[in-house]
Amino acid sequence: MRYTHSRSREFCESIAFYKGEAEARQFADAALEPLIERQIALARKAAVASWFNHVCLELSGTVLPIVIVHWLFPSIDSSEFSLLSQELNGMMYTLTVLLQIAPQVAAFFGTLNRVTQLDAQLDAMPPLGKSCIDCTQRVAVQELDVVSPGEETLVRDLSFAVGANEGGVVVTGPSGCGKSSTLRVIS
């Protein structure tokens, strides 16, 4: 396929000059025919798989509850049967939703676990300087050293204070110098 395209592109002037369009077209068609046949076969298989998936969903939503309810409670009347089928459909839908959101829940709990581990490690660390709690509406940092987990000192002796009605703090520097790490430590 790629060779056919390259050949047509490279020799397009020669093909046109010597009136070889018909021959070039036959060559391209011969090269493309297996690809087109594979695409058609793939489209047919995709259509069959889609139909099968749709039928399975319909069967699991309508026929399966009927079979399960009839198997569990063979002596119920039609109104009870209808209610039980609806409840079973609702439970199957809820189970489907739970299975679909399981990866997001796992990711959330993984993040939550990392945050709680970080919080426990921060609580276990002895304070290096004096700790002062001030309940005013300001953020103040005095002589703060920011050290990476690899024991690399990112910032040394950082000191600043920002009041509630004052501007803000602008942290600048090249990429990878520890700006985000500094802000994480402060927050």
Image (cartoon, rainbow, N blue to C red):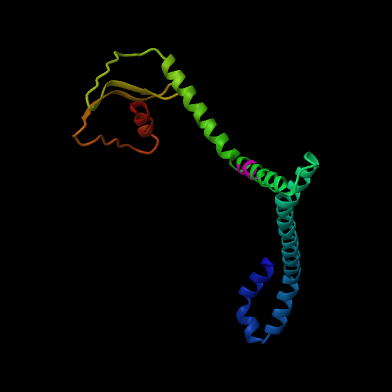
Q: Residue furthest left?
A: 165
**Residue drawn at the location 22% of the way across and 24% of the way down:** 136
Classify residue 97 by image quadrant. Answer: top right
Q: Is residue 130 above or below residue 147?
A: above
Q: Position of residue 100 (x, y in %)?
A: 61, 43
Q: From which residue to which does the magenta span run?
A: 93-97
128 in relation to 146, above or below: above
Q: Is residue 12 left or right of residue 174?
A: right
In percent of the image, x 71 and y 84: which residue is there? 22
Question: In the image, is residue 136 part of the stretch drawn in magenta?
Answer: no
Q: Position of residue 149 (x, y in %)?
A: 45, 23
Q: Is residue 145 left or right of residue 137?
A: right
Quadrant of the snapshot with the N terminus: bottom right
Instruction: Report the residue at 75% width, 51% height from top.
Output: 63
Say which of 174 and 186 sits in front.
186
Q: Quadrant of residue 153?
A: top left
Is residue 94 shown in magenta?
yes
State left or right for residue 136 relative to residue 23: left
Write the residue at 46% across / 23% down: 118
Which percent across, then down, holds residue 38? 75, 65
In terms of secondary structure, what is the magenta stretch mainly? helix
- 177 and 108: which is toward the camera: 108
Q: Position of residue 99 (x, y in %)?
A: 63, 41
